[in-house]
Amino acid sequence: MNDNSNFQEWFKNFSPKLGLRETSFKKIIQFLDSQPAPITIVETGCLRKEDNFLDGQSTLIFDKYTLSRGNGSKVYTVDINPKSTEVCKKVVSKNVDVATDDSVRYLNNLAKIFIDKSIKVTMFFLDSYDVDWRHPYPSAAHHLKELTAIQKILDKNTLVVVDDAPAIGHLERSEENLSKDWKVMQSFSPTIGGKGFLVHEYACHVKAKVFFSHYQTAWIGFNQ
Ligand SMILES: C[S@@+](CC[C@H](N)C(=O)[O-])C[C@H]1O[C@@H](n2cnc3c(N)ncnc32)[C@H](O)[C@@H]1O
């Protein structure tokens, strides 16, 4: 049992502001609680605007969490936009390593450093390259490139979370009662959309498992 009651108290007040990300952030915290310290979190796409809950404030949550776990727990985050990293540095503690770089290049370099130093990553949180919901391919491809860059340091227990990656499906509307909810069509299985749709296709190929799927989706079991 981790004694991170200060964090839990802070998060209890903070989490209702997370809206559609509340459930998945709670599941992320439960997962991190189940993992041994040091907790190492690597994030792409940092907090770019203070108190902007449309984004999620992920870097702040991970900063508070890793500080509460101690024992060398740490956050690494990268963003291509210097304005984002400037804001982020003002909001988070010095325990967060904030880099200004392209995420794919950064992750590729970080993977080499982590292999040399035997640093095991507890969770990757991939949230760079904003998604265009009508044309998600460029964003989804970018997140697949990020996965490619970290592939060699994914452990069977590493959690990979992609933000803005809800399930999508083919739906039908009941003709009798148009006011009823949409129904998922039986003939097509729902899948993961948004930023995570190509990561999900890869996960299916290598039999990684969906750990949870809400507005954010998480997978575990890459490199089993
Ligand atoms: C959705 S925001 C991140 C929000 C943050 N995770 C939060 O919860 O507050 C996406 C960020 O990704 C950054 N970004 C876009 N393309 C990128 C790339 N190729 N490499 C790194 N960051 C990138 C943008 O500058 C932007 O700040």
Image (tube, rainbow, N blue to C red):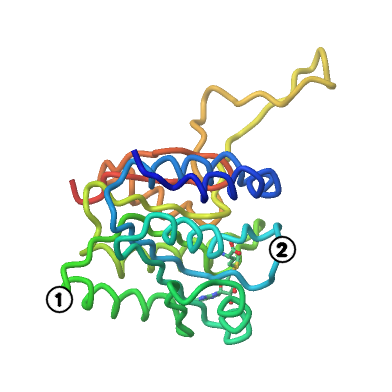
Q: Nearer the viewer, residue 190 or 7?
A: 7
Residue appearing at x 39%, y 42% in the figure: 31
x, y percentage for residue 104?
39, 75
Residue 16 as seen in the image, left or right of residue 141: right
Q: Quadrant of the N terminus?
A: top left
Residue 117 as seen in the image, left or right of residue 191: left
Rendered-image quarter of ligand 1? bottom right
> Mark 2 = which residue?
52
Residue 161 as seen in the image, left or right of residue 40: right
Q: Residues within 10 Å of mark 1 (few under 14, many from 20)?
A: few
x, y percentage for residue 65?
46, 56
> Mark 1 = which residue?
116
Q: CA distance from mark 1 to mark 2?
A: 37 Å
Q: Nearer the viewer, residue 94 or 78?
A: 94
Would you identify the image quadrant in which residue 70 lies? bottom left
Residue appearing at x 53%, y 65% in the figure: 59
Residue 93: mark in rendering: none
Asked if disc 2 is less than 8 Å from ligand 1, the answer is: yes
Residue appearing at x 61%, y 73% in the figure: 91
Q: As displayed, is residue 185 above or below residue 213?
A: above
x, y percentage for residue 211?
39, 38
Classify mark 2: helix, strand or loop: loop
Amino acid type at circle 1 is: Asp
Classify mark 1: helix, strand or loop: helix
Residue 72 as seen in the image, left or right of residue 4: left
x, y percentage for residue 82?
58, 87
Q: Earlier in the sequence, mark 1 or mark 2?
A: 2
Amino acid type at circle 2 is: Asn
Q: As displayed, is residue 22 above or below residue 176?
A: below
